[in-house]
Image: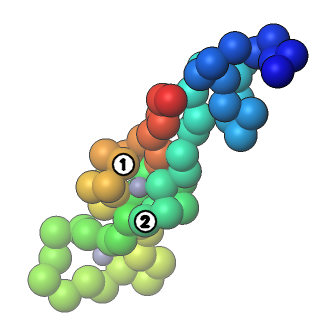
Amino acid sequence: MGDTAGPGMDPDIGDDDLGYEWVTCEACGGDGVDGHDCGEDTCNCLRPEENRTCHICRGEGGWKREE
Ligand SMILES: [Zn+2]
Ligand SMILES: [Zn+2]
């Protein structure tokens, strides 16, 4: 019907330049860290930094969603 894009071209995919879509990890918000762990049973840190590697994205902060 005059479609020159051909089959397999999904117009919903906007990141065609990269070839993939970057998905931000919702668990850590893209920081790659989720939660604080200083090794102490009772944390006495005044300002507990998030230093636990996010197990969802393995510290990457997201992942590629290849289509
Ligand atoms: Zn701590
Ligand atoms: Zn994450």
Task: Please name whichever residue, 17 or 9, is drawn nearer the observer in this view of the structure.
Answer: 9
Secondary structure under tag 2 reads loop
Give the label on residue 27, or none: 2
Instruction: Determine whether label 1 and label 2 are within 8 Å by CB.
Output: yes
Q: Is residue 26 visible?
A: yes
Dot 2 alpha-carbon crowd within 10 angstroms: few under 14, some 14 to 19, many 20 or more = some
Residue 31 visible, this orientation? no
**Above or below, comparing residue 49 to residue 1 in the picture:** below
> Is residue 26 depicted above or below 14 in this figure?
below
Tell me how far mark 1 sits from mark 2, CA to CA.
Answer: 8 Å
- For this view, does 44 lie left or right of residue 26? left
Whether the residue carrying mark 1 lies under 8 Å from ligand 2 is answered with yes
Furthest-front residue in this view: 1
In the rendered view of the protein, which quadrant contains the N terminus?
A: top right
For the residue marked with disc 1, what is the amino acid?
A: Cys
Residue at x 48%, y 55% (from the top left corner) = 25
Judging by the rendered image, the residue that carries numbered circle 1 is 57
Up/down of 54 relative to 27, above or below? above
